[in-house]
Image (cartoon, coloured by chain):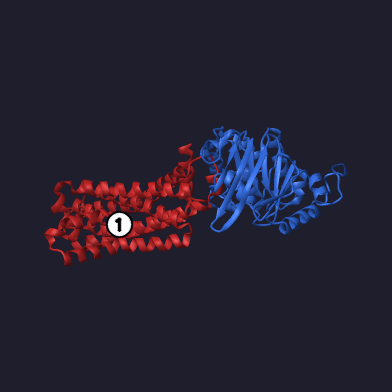
Chain colours: A blue, B red
């Protein structure tokens, strides 16, 4: 569903994303984790058509993300890290625009807003919404229609525990509808609860990737999947792998899954 | 989809305080200019729109480009912050065109309110003679608004940040409103008037503000005060001058928009 081959990006002298290869299948959730400046958002923004790649290719549901950008974006929902709409936008106007670009009836879009708990905010200006409400609104817009790919940059940012639960449930609902999900997050709890695969990035390159159990093994942190998901020592696993990524800069990354040639 | 995008941009433009302030401020200024013009000329002896319209034209060529360049510059720079909207299945060219159309409509409506209220005052106090020419003046104002707004958007999109965009817009306004006239005077000082004709006419087309000013003055047969560029245009192009000026203003709208769309489509946000 999402195919990335040798995708890289340079900003002036900075190599923000080293060649990335990744395949995300329908109904699969992949998380990008890593410290600030690791290249997570850069990867998502290239796929969403916000940035032009310096090289490599990516397809969304078979559409090239660069040469068929509009067709590719028709298949995906994108939630940026920043607001990304004029603050004076009225909720209903934004919903109408998203519905029109996706070719779905406005009533269906309204139902999605109600489902997101924002049914009574149709006439509100986005700037008047709380951080959590804004995030729920944009997520509802991003998942509107049967998008086949979801790109989410920090989906749980500014949310309280209940809000974060709702966001996770929205993502799971999209996955049940067959969407391929790629998300970047600093909230490792979300990552542990949602991701089928985790990609650890440091300084623009993949330093490790695999399931949580595989990463735990790679980081020499004792934990098995059977031990239960609620409290995996993901923080420890993350710190070990990021530190190793920093120490091993320029060397071959850990390869834990055949799919992910790092 | 284009309609939805235009509605979205129009709704945002309508809610902006800029439009309300511009409408109110321009209406007040237009009324003041109209009433002062009428009283100075004597409402009884000066009939119709001619005298006050020439004064209003001066207001238009100073205020409209300033407002449109600043608004366009800010709206263009803001495009770089619309990551969610750009991530929707639409082209960046469509987004920019919708922005321009929405702001042209919103500020055009404000302009209509301003010039319309002054027009009503003039018609009541001095009669409706030359009313059709006054409507043409509103049309010229819209053409100038459309052109300078497109230029402002191009400035905003290429400048990327609001502060830089506003700075460049102010410098551009000064060049268009004052600088080009200074260049025209310089050309006349160096070259004999006969040889300077084509150069001055081209200079006129290179400045949408001067083009609108000369076109407006021509509407009210005020050619005597059209300045060196206006005189040169009449001599070189004769009766075609007005159409050339309109063509120039349309080109000043289309070219910056096309260039801005092209630039914006190729750049990282």
Q: Position of residue A3 (x, y in %)?
A: 63, 38
Q: Is mark 1 on a helix, strand or loop?
A: helix
The residue nearer to you, when weighing B160 against A143, is: B160
Left or right, residue A237 beside residue A202: right
Quickly name the residue at label 1. B60
- Residue at x-position 23% and y-position 53%: B216
| Figure disc tally | 1
Q: Where is residue A134 in the image (x, y as percent from the top left)?
A: 63, 49
Q: Where is residue B13 in the image (x, y as percent from the top left)?
A: 46, 50
Look at the picture and state if A71 lies above or below B96. above
**Circle 1 Cα neighbour tier, 10 Å, few/some/many (<14 / 14–19 / ≥20):** many
Residue B104 in view in this figure: no
Look at the picture and state if B55 lies above or below A181. below
The residue nearer to you, when weighing B87 against A14, is: A14
The residue nearer to you, when weighing B152 against A57, is: A57
Left or right, residue B245 beside residue B17: left
Q: Quadrant of the N terminus of chain A?
A: top right
Q: Which chain carries label 1?
A: B
Left or right, residue B182 beside residue A109: left
Q: Where is residue B245 in the image (x, y as percent from the top left)?
A: 24, 49
- Residue at x-position 14% and y-position 49%: B238
Looking at this rendering, what residue extends furthest in the front direction?
A251
The residue nearer to you, when weighing B46 against A238, is: A238
């Amino acid at each position: 569903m999402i195919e990335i081959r040798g995708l890289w990006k340079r900003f002036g002298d900075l190599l923000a994303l080293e060649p990335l290869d990744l395949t995300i299948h329908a109904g699969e959730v992949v998380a990008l984790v890593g410290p600030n400046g690791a290249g997570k958002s850069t990867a998502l923004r290239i796929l969403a058509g916000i940035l032009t790649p310096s090289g490599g290719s990516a397809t969304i549901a078979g559409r090239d993300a660069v040469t068929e950008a509009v067709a590719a974006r028709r298949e995906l929902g994108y939630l940026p890290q920043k607001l990304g709409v004029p603050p004076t936008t009225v909720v209903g106007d934004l919903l109408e625009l998203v519905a029109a670009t996706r070719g779905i009836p406005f009533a269906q879009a309204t139902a999605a807003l109600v489902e997101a708990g924002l049914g009574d905010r149709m006439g509100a200006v986005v700037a008047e919404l709380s951080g959590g409400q804004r995030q729920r609104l944009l997520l509802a817009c991003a998942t509107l229609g049967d998008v086949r790919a979801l790109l989410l940059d920090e989906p749980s940012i500014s949310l309280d525990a209940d809000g974060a639960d709702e966001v996770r449930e929205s993502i799971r609902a999209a996955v049940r509808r067959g969407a391929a999900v790629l998300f970047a997050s600093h909230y490792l709890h979300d990552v542990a609860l949602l991701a089928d695969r985790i990609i650890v990035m440091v300084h623009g390159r993949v330093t490790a990737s695999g399931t949580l159990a595989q990463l735990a093994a790679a980081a020499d942190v004792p934990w098995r999947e059977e031990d239960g998901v609620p409290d995996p020592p993901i923080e420890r696993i993350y710190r070990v792998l990021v530190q190793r990524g920093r120490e091993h800069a320029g060397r071959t990354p850990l390869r834990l899954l055949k799919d992910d040639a790092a | 989809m284009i309609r939805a995008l235009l509605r979205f941009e129009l709704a945002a433009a309508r809610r902006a305080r800029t439009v309300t302030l511009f409408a109110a401020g321009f209406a007040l200024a237009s009324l003041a200019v109209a009433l002062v013009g009428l009283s100075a000329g004597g409402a009884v002896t000066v009939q119709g729109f001619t005298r006050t319209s020439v004064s209003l034209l001066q207001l238009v060529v100073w205020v409209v480009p300033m407002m449109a360049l600043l608004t366009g510059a800010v709206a263009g720079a803001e495009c770089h912050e619309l990551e969610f909207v750009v991530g929707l299945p639409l082209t960046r060219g469509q987004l920019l065109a919708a922005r321009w159309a929405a702001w042209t409509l919103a500020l055009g409506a404000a302009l209509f309110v301003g010039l319309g209220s002054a027009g009503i005052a003039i018609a009541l106090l001095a009669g409706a003679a030359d009313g059709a020419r006054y409507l043409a003046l509103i049309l010229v104002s819209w053409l100038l608004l459309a052109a300078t707004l497109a230029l402002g958007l191009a400035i905003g999109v290429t400048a990327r940040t609001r502060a830089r965009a506003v700075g460049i817009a102010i410098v551009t306004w000064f060049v268009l409103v004052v600088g080009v006239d200074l260049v025209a005077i310089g050309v006349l000082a160096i070259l004999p008037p006969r040889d300077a004709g084509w150069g001055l006419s081209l200079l006129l087309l290179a400045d949408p503000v001067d083009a609108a000013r000369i076109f407006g003055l021509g509407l009210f047969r005020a050619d005597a005060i059209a300045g060196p560029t206006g005189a040169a245009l009449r001599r070189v192009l004769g009766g075609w001058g007005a159409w050339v000026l309109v063509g120039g203003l349309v080109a000043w709208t289309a070219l910056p928009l096309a260039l801005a769309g092209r630039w914006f489509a190729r750049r990282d946000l």
